[in-house]
Image (tube, helix red, strand yellow):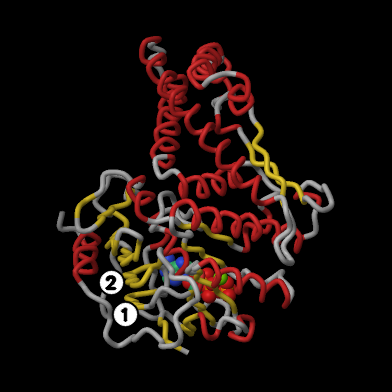
């Protein structure tokens, strides 16, 4: 592998923290942070030709004007988790584009991100980026501690990441797929194998859909795919159910200014798991898939399976469905769920997830902002927060590291 991205990955994996950016010094947080990104290096990632950042385990506040590159930086970190990152962009879209009016000295190559992550088991080096050599140009290269990882699911073994973005202000108002992805990220935190199951289920589902559409409609082949869908699918639904129930149990009470939330999972596979043991639920899903072949082939969709399930959230105080709550209440509900996740994960797994909070202050009043920051510090969460003004992060000064972002560079404030 000598393509540009893999060379960049290798280089980045070998490079230590940049000596020019020293972690800022101030008192250590009240609770030791056990999971944190401590070094980050971006190459040809959106507006960043080459950016390096070394931080300690406290939260990081990134401020700068609109378009400065704050969300781009969070997106780069989101590639330390399985999946397509927080924008779900095509990988090729992320390669740095140079405006024709401002050609630079070197033409950009495929993007790469390298990071050191402090974990309860010690530091882990992660390198990832677009494999420009792959047929589609859309494959992600991944190295963990220098070794090539075959599947992105390997990331969930080391890093637990959740995020909140301005797009998620509409999480309760639109289709169910983003809610399932939101829930899956929460599940990874308790059950890293979930990422591989979700991947296995989706792959078998895509292959079955392709067979039903293009043939050959080989019954033995379809049978094998449906068996895989049933096994992975029931495991996916069971893990989602379990985590939803655990979170629901700790979310119902309001927490400071954050409302209580009632969480439930809906869907046929999820319901059948209420009544049947897992093995019987698998048999049931397999039967239903086999029976739906003709309809699925005609409609080009898959009518049954956990990809139809949904996370339902209610405001515990008012009883209103999240979709009927005010914008600020919806945001507060999401923050409440994430904080509950952090509390549970810190308690049960010894480390809260890293949180990417893009413009989280937007719909929060000063009291809620202060309560959020205090809780992040108390739980030992390393959060990466963005905003246009440092003043929005009053209260985090001693517990955070402030950087200014402008024009492809990141500098301590
Ligand atoms: N592939 C790319 N190559 C070069 N620049 C890009 C690429 N993709 C996006 N950009 C640019 O990156 C800039 C920074 O975007 P980003 O979303 O990170 O800004 P931001 O600091 O979060 O701003 P806001 O406060 O408005 O959210 C934008 O001007 C965008 O046009
Ligand atoms: Mg932004």
Residue 32 is situated, as x and y percent measured from the top left of the image, at 43, 70
**In the rendered image, which residue does mark 2 sit on?**
107
Mark 1 burial class by Cα count in 10 Å: few <14, some 14-19, many 20+: few
Q: Name the disc covering residue 158, or none.
A: none
Left or right side of 172 for 293 = left
Q: In this rendering, would 117 be left or right of 232?
A: left
Q: Quadrant of the N terminus?
A: bottom left
Image check: 135 left or right of 215? left
Residue in view at x 55 percent, y 70 percent: 378
Image position, residue 413 (x, y; %): 48, 90
Which residue occupies the extreme right position in the image?
Answer: 318
- Between 355 and 386, the one lying in front of the other is 355
Above or below: residue 73 compared with residue 259: below
* Secondary structure found at label 1: loop
Query: Splitting the image into 4 quarters, where does residue 364 fall?
Result: bottom right
Question: Mark 2 Cα within 10 Å, few/some/many (few <14, many 20+)?
Answer: few
Asked if disc 1 is less than 8 Å from ligand 1, the answer is no
> Which residue is labeled 1 in the image?
104
**Residue at 40 percent of width and 58 percent of height:** 79
Q: Are marks 1 and 2 in contact (CB under 8 Å)?
A: yes
């Amino acid at each position: 592998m000598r393509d540009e991205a893999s060379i960049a990955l290798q280089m980045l994996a070998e490079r230590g923290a940049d000596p020019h950016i020293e972690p800022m010094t101030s008192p250590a947080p009240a609770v030791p942070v056990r999971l944190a990104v401590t070094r980050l290096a971006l190459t040809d990632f959106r507006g960043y030709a080459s950016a390096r950042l070394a931080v300690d385990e406290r939260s990081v506040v990134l401020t700068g004007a609109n378009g400065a590159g704050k969300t781009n930086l969070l997106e780069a970190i989101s590639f330390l988790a399985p999946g397509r990152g927080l924008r779900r962009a095509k990988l090729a879209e992320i390669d740095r584009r140079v405006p024709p009016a401002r050609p630079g000295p070197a033409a950009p190559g495929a993007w790469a991100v390298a990071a050191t992550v402090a974990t309860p088991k010690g530091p882990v080096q992660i390198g990832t980026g677009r494999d420009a050599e792959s047929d589609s140009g859309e494959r992600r290269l991944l190295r963990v501690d220098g070794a090539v990882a075959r599947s992105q699911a390997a990331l969930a073994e080391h890093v637990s990441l959740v995020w909140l973005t301005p797009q998620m202000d509409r999480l309760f108002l639109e289709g169910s797929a983003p809610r399932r992805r939101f829930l899956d990220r929460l599940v990874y935190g308790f059950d890293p194998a979930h990422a591989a199951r979700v991947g296995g289920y989706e792959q078998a589902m895509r292959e079955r859909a392709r067979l039903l559409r293009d043939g050959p409609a080989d019954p033995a082949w379809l049978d094998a795919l449906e068996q895989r869908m049933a096994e992975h699918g029931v495991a996916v639904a069971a893990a989602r159910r379990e985590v939803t129930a655990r979170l629901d149990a700790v979310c119902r009470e309001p927490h400071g200014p954050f409302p209580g939330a009632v969480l439930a999972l809906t869907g046929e596979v999820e319901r059948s798991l209420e009544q049947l043991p897992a093995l019987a639920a698998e048999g049931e899903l397999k039967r239903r898939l086999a029976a739906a072949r003709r309809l699925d082939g005609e409609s080009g969709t898959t009518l049954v399976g956990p990809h139809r399930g949904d996370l339902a959230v209610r405001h515990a105080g008012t009883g209103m469905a999240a979709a009927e709550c005010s914008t600020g209440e919806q945001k507060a509900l999401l923050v409440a769920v994430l904080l509950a996740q952090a509390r549970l994960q810190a308690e049960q797994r010894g480390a809260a997830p890293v949180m990417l909070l893009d413009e989280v202050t937007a719909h929060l009043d000063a009291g809620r902002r202060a309560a959020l920051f205090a809780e992040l510090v108390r739980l030992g969460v390393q959060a990466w927060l963005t905003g246009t003004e440092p003043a929005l992060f009053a209260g985090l000064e001693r517990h955070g590291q402030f950087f200014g972002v402008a024009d492809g560079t990141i500098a301590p404030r």
